Amino acid sequence: MSIHGKEFKIFAGSAGKSTAEQICSCMQIPLGRSQVGKFSDGETAVSLLETVRGADCFIVQSTSDPVNDNLMEMLIMADAMRRASAARITAVIPYFGYARQDRKARARDPISAKLVADLITAAGVDRVLTMDLHAAQIQGFFNIPVDHLLGAPVLASFIRERLGDEVKDGYVVVSPDLGSVTRARTFAAKIGCPMAIVDKRRPRPNESEVMNVIGDVKGKKVILVDDMIDTAGSICNAARAMMERGALEVTACATHGVLSGPAVERLEESPIREVILLDTVPLKEEKRSSKLTILPVAPHFAEAIERIYMDKPISPLFV
């Protein structure tokens, strides 16, 4: 398999262990041996328990809650690999934390996503592999290659297999805000049904109000499509707006299930029948719900990793 005359190895941080194990299972290789913990004063401690000299190394780590701890784990692991003479280091980040802080919304705001990109590069990472950045322009914050996978093909494939030809007649894909229109349009094209758009405004962070719905949802089964569900305010408000306008039922699809704060309670109380998520963010036990359906991203990332290692194009994964 090696065309570079060197091995490739996959390592995992605390928030990426399950995904990394599934990736290794798909690729039929062992997970790289490492130890991640904390010193008594709270500092992150990382030890690589096998050689990485001359190896193509992949670090699997979602920078989800606790965001700063998981980010530091990845940075320290990359630094350890660089100092141990790894040939190339790729950060595999299924969920990229700080991605929503991608611009100055107000005077004197930081652009934290750019700062995180600089930290990752400074730690010695040569390449980034991630999925559904909140703003695709974040790729430009890096001066190293960024492979940006999409969650929509995985979600759309699941919906197509489940519904078959039924999806063409009784369903409509809805974007819960103007920022997700391109994603929803692509999703609708993949499963072959019409789309609608929710026009909303945000009076305060993590709060939203539905102003209008562009398109017809009356008598239809609605599929809401977004990149992430955080506090679930937007998706639940959109679902209620759909039902008020005559929708028969609502299903929600999203790549990242952040599910912070009152998210699970809101989803349980909402008219949403089912929430389909990818496992880019580790789901804590207290966040589990009967409404949640979790799909694995490991096969998608395993193919991307193999293509990166073999110097093959990533673009076939976007279809």
Image (spheres, helix red, strand yellow):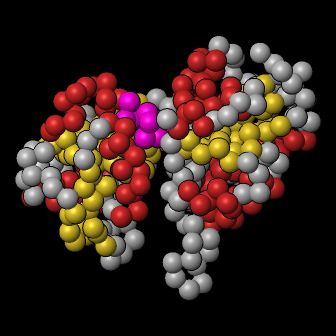
Q: Is residue 155 magenta?
A: yes
74 to 11, vertically: above or below: below
- Where is residue 55? Give x, y as percent: 85, 28
Which residue is pictured at 22% across the width and 71% down the height?
211
Counting every numbered tag in the picture gives 0
Q: Is residue 191 above or below residue 5?
A: below
Q: Main secondary structure of the magenta part?
A: helix
Q: Position of residue 133 (x, y in %)?
A: 54, 52
Q: Nearer the viewer, residue 121 or 67?
A: 121
Residue 121 shown in magenta: no
Residue 112 appears left or right of 151: right
187 left or right, relative to 23: left
Q: Residue 201: percent from the left, percent from the top?
A: 31, 73
In this picture, is 154 found above or below 175? above
Q: Quadrant of residue 142?
A: bottom right
Note whether residue 11 is visible. Answer: no
Quadrant in which residue 314 is drawn:
top right
The reply, left or right, for residue 48 in relation to residue 266 is right
At 31% from the left and 29% from the top, the residue drawn is: 160
Magenta span covers which residues? 151-157
Q: At 68% from the left edge and 48% from the top edge, which residue is drawn?
A: 146
Location of residue 89 in the rendering, given as x and y in whole percent from the top left corner: 79, 39
Residue 85 visible to the viewer: yes
Locate the N terminus by quadrant.
top right
Looking at this view, is 93 or 319 the one in front? 319
